[in-house]
Image (tube, helix red, strand yellow):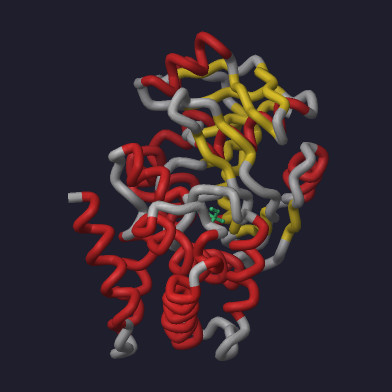
Amino acid sequence: MRVTIVGCGALGGLVGARIARSGNEIQILQRPGSTLKRLRSRGLELDDGGTVRAFAAKAEADPSRLGKAPLVIVAVKSYATADVAPLLKDLLEEDGLVLTLQNGLGNAEQMASFIGTDRVGAASCTYGAYRDAEGLVHAGGEGEIRFGPMRLGREWKAVEELLAGSGLQARHVCDPRPDLWAKLVVNAAINPVSALTRRENGHILACADTARLAKTLTLEACRVARAEGMPFGEGTMWPQVRLVIQATSGNRSSMLQDVLAGRPTEIEAISGEILRRGRAFHLRLPATATVRALIRGLEG
Ligand code: KPL
C-alpha cells in the first residue's frame, strides 16, 4: 500500500520506517528545513534497537508533488494541525482515509471539517521515539496504537492489517475517544514533568517527589475526563501511567525533545486543553495549572 506520512518527526519517522520495512511505499510531506534535507539525501532512517536502516521515501514540502494515497498518517505537532488539515484533500485518493497519531484532543475534528468525519480515524499511540542531535530517529520503547473512526461507516480493517504487518502493536476500536482521553492523561502526567526536570521518562518514578507530582497530574486530568463522561474511576489511570513510564523509561518525552530543541511545545493541546475543559465544570486543577505556566515560561 502507498502511505503518506505528514510530519516526519520522531514518531512519524518510527511509524513510517516500520511501514516501509514491511514492503509498503512511503511518501513524506515535510515542511522545508533540516529534516526534509536529511530525508532527501539519506532516505528515511531509523535506529530500531541498535540497527540503523534507511528506507527509500519520496519527501516533498509541496503536496502537489506527491502521488495521491489511500492512507495518510498525520504525525505533526498538534499546534500545526490547522496548517495541514486543508492539504489532506490533495493528498488522498477519492476514498482515502486519514489516521492521526497526534497528542492532544481536537485534531481529528479539525481534519474532519475538510474531508468528512467518516474518513478520519484517531489513534492513541504510546510508542516512544526520539531524534538525536544529528536528526537520526531512534525507537524509544514499544507501545500500542489503538485507533478507531470518528464516525462509523468506513472499513478500517486494512489499516489495522497494515500497522500490525509492520511490526506495530495495533488495535482497532469502535470509538477512539476514551483512548484519546487516556493518552491525554498519560501525556499530561509525563510530558511536563520530564520537560521541566530534563530527564528521561523513567526518572519520574525514580524520584519520589516527581512520582507524586505525576500522580497528582494524573488524578486532576481524570477528574476532567470523568466530568466529560469518560469511564475513568478514581485511581484507575495511575497504574497505566506508571506502565507507560516503565515501557518508555529510556525515552525523552516529546515535550522534553521540543524544549531541548528550542521548539514550541504541545502544552496547550495537553495541559491547556485539560484546564479549558475543566473550567467548564468549575474544577480546580492547581498542579496542571502550575506545570502549564512553567512550560509556557520555558517556551517564552
Ligand atoms: O507520548 C509520549 C510523548 O513523549 O509524547 C510518551 C508515550 C509519553 C512517550 O514519551
The quarter of the displayed image where residue 171 is located: bottom right
Q: Quadrant of the N terminus?
A: top right
Q: Where residue 215 sits in the image (x, y, percent)?
A: 49, 78
Q: Can residue 95 be seen in this view?
A: no
Viewer-nearest residue: 110 or 180: 180
Residue 34, placed above or below residue 69 = above
Viewer-nearest residue: 276 or 215: 215
The total of numbered circles placed on residues is 0
Q: Residue at 48% across / 35% down in the picture?
A: 9
Q: Residue at 77% across / 39% down in the picture?
A: 162
Residue 88, placed above or below residue 182 = above
Q: Residue at 53% across / 57% down in the picture?
A: 201
Extreme-top residue of the structure: 41
Q: Where residue 280 sits in the image (x, y, percent)?
A: 30, 84
Q: Where residue 244 sits in the image (x, y, percent)?
A: 62, 63
Extreme-front residue of the structure: 207
Residue 96, placed above or below residue 187 = above
Q: Residue at 46% across / 79% down in the picture?
A: 212
- Left or right: 271 as drawn, with respect to 104: left
- Left or right: 134 as drawn, with respect to 171: left
Q: Where residue 188 sits in the image (x, y, percent)?
A: 44, 67
Q: Is residue 155 visible?
A: yes
Viewer-nearest residue: 9 or 199: 199
The quarter of the displayed image where residue 167 is located: top right
